[in-house]
Amino acid sequence: MRRLFPTIAIFAILISFPDNAEAEQPYKNALKLTFLSWASGSTKISYERAFPGIRQSSELCASVIGAGYDKYHNDPSGFTIRYGHKFFFNGYRPEKPLTGFYLRPEAIYSHYRYTHSVCGERTLAQMGALLGTFGYQYCIGRFIADAWVGGGYAFGTPAETGYHHGFQLWKWLGYRNDNIALSFSIRIGYVW
């Protein structure tokens, strides 16, 4: 844990220096890790491709559930996949097509098994969600950072915790609703 943050800082500094050989061409691709996803029980990697002429990009994210710290101690194993299409508006520049504020509708599917805390049996959690997210993405050199918040509609067979390794079901103020999904995160990565 003590080595993780210095490693990330060194990585960010090294890739943030501009590459003069490619300064004329805008970076259109990004490979990102969801920052601290391992702390919630999964490892998430995403690929994004910009379409500069139309101020949009597509993003596909896959995660391995169980490849990280098991915060609920229920031994989860499975996967999550999500696809989102970003529509950039304020702050967008054609020479940096992956930078700016955006709106992103997205679809998420989460499928995993976990050990139920009451009966102790392996239980299937299989949920889908349709979300609308709002975020900001910034590139400096070859480093990219992306942060967002969002919410939407969820459907399927929920886990007892309400956490589906890509979104959280509404479980606040003493009320739980298995049809309201919330999502927020930070991703960091590399552009080319």
Image (spheres, rainbow, N blue to C red):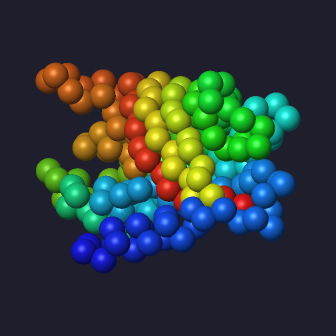
Which quarter of the rendered picture does the N terminus lie within?
A: bottom left
Q: In which quarter of the image is residue 18?
A: bottom right
Image height of 33 relative to 153, above or below: below
Image height of 59 relative to 16, above or below: above
* Residue 182 vs residue 12, the one in the foreground: 12
* Residue 53 vs residue 40, the one in the foreground: 53
* Residue 181 vs residue 10, the one in the foreground: 10
Q: Can residue 9 be seen in this view?
A: yes
How many marks can you see? 0
> Horizontal and vertical percent for residue 83?
63, 43
Q: In this view, does 59 lie to the left or right of 166?
A: right
Residue at point 42%, 68% (across, down): 8
Which quarter of the rendered picture does the C terminus lie within?
A: bottom right
Q: In this view, does 47 lie to the left or right of 49?
A: left
Q: Quadrant of residue 105?
A: top right
Residue at point 49%, 64% (across, down): 12
> Horizontal and vertical percent for residue 31?
62, 60
Image height of 132 relative to 121, above or below: above
Q: In this view, does 115 lie to the left or right of 109?
A: left
